[in-house]
Image: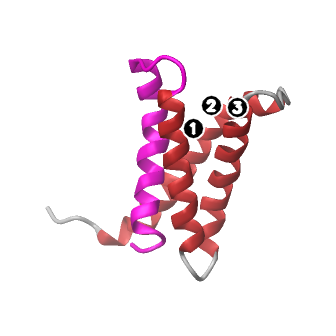
Amino acid sequence: MRPQKSFVSLAKWLLRIALAIIVFSLYFDRISDLDFSSLIWYISVFMVLFTILLIVGVFVKKESLTVISGLVVAVLSVIMIFMGNVDLDAIVTHCAPLAIGFYFMARGNRG
């Protein structure tokens, strides 16, 4: 059976939607606390902001917004893995945003 290349754009949209769901479920409660003295609060704000920019990046002609947003999401996911104790729970929690961000950093808006 051959891969269906016509579903690539749908798959990329599903990745964006999955990233938005994961990021909002992980970080939205932290943002609503408004704890300006916490480093995790700032990371959470940047994670939500760059996830939104990654979704908006598909509507922009140049793909640099998507690439930069993917890079920031991937780097922030790595930072969140290594903050505090590095355990399996942290790796599993932040692995999906890391992979999706890295994918969009590497591929941009191309199919």
- Residue 77 image point, x, y percent: 51, 39
> Circle 2 sits in a helix, a strand or a loop, which is it?
helix
Quadrant of the image containing the C terminus: bottom left
Q: Image point 66% across, 60% down: which residue?
A: 53
Residue drawn where x is 48% and y is 17% of the image: 85
| Residue underneath mark 1 | 22
Can the viewer see residue 40 in this picture? yes
87 vs 55, nearest the viewer: 87
Q: Quadrant of residue 52?
A: bottom right
The secondary structure that dominates the magenta segment is: helix
Where residue 93 sits in the image (x, y, percent)? 48, 28
**Circle 3 residue:** 39
Q: Secondary structure at mark 1?
A: helix
Q: Which portion, as a residue range, is magenta?
A: 83-111
Q: Is residue 44 left or right of residue 78?
A: right
Q: Along the polypeptide, which appears first: circle 3 or circle 2?
A: 2
Q: Mark 2 = which residue?
A: 26
In the picture provided, is 35 more to the left or to the right than 42? right
Can residue 18 be seen at all in this image of the molecule? no
Q: Residue furthest bottom?
A: 61
